[in-house]
Image (cartoon, grey):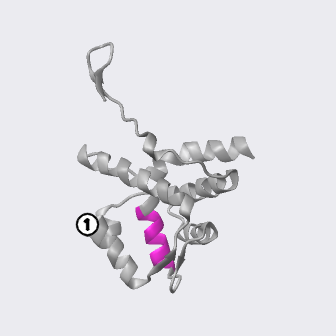
Amino acid sequence: MLGRRSDGSPQLGLIDYGQVKRITKADRHLFCRIVLALAEDNKPRIVELMRQAGFESKSMDPEVIYSYAKVAYDEDSKELTKGLHIQMFMEELQARDPIIALPYDFIVIGRCSLILRGLAHALKQPRSVAKAWRPIAERVLRDDL
């Protein structure tokens, strides 16, 4: 939806009710901790939390777990993906250490992260989703506990 603000400047609004998902309080808190670890780029913590969330791969390679979490929930920078298109990078991860199980309730969150980043790339505004979501994650953990 494209509109105009009262001062005449353009305004863009996006609504996608197809991305509505309810997750348990425990999973919400776990995902908030994943967001904080991603925002801090705390690799051991990211790997530990992804394991807690139910991520499983054949060899449980920490590098694959870390890379998967970064791409699914945070960013897809050229440094991270080694210059590969995100799809090719994910296929490379799958070839290195096949994914057996994904945290089902977090799949929609990953999809949302990818859609937001796709829009940001189209607008030449790449972002770290985890850094953008960090204040929300901190507030949820502070207010919910």
Residue at 38% from the left image edge and 77% from the top image edge: 93
- In the rendered image, the residue lying farthest to the front is 18
58 with respect to 86 (left or right):
right
Badge count: 1
In which quadrant will I find the N terminus? top left
91 with respect to 26 (left or right):
left
Q: Is residue 23 above or below residue 89?
A: above
Q: What span is in magenta? A: 62-71
Q: Nearer the viewer, residue 50 or 46?
A: 50
Q: Is residue 122 above or below residue 87?
A: above
Q: Is residue 67 magenta-colored?
A: yes
Q: Nearer the viewer, residue 14 or 138?
A: 14
18 with respect to 86 (left or right):
right
Mark 1, secondary structure of its residue? loop
Residue at 38% from the left image edge and 54% from the top image edge: 114
User: Residue 140 in the image: x percent, y percent?
Assistant: 64, 44
Residue that numbered label 1 is attached to: 85
* Principal secondary structure, stretch drawn in magenta: helix
Residue at 30% from the left image edge and 65% from the top image edge: 86
Report which quarter residue 48 is drawn in: bottom right
- In the rendered image, the residue lying farthest to the bottom is 59
6 with respect to 136 (left or right):
left
User: Residue 92 in the image: x percent, y percent?
Assistant: 33, 78
User: Residue 96 in the image: x percent, y percent?
Assistant: 39, 84
Mark 1 residue type: His
Residue at 35% from the left image edge and 71% from the top image edge: 90
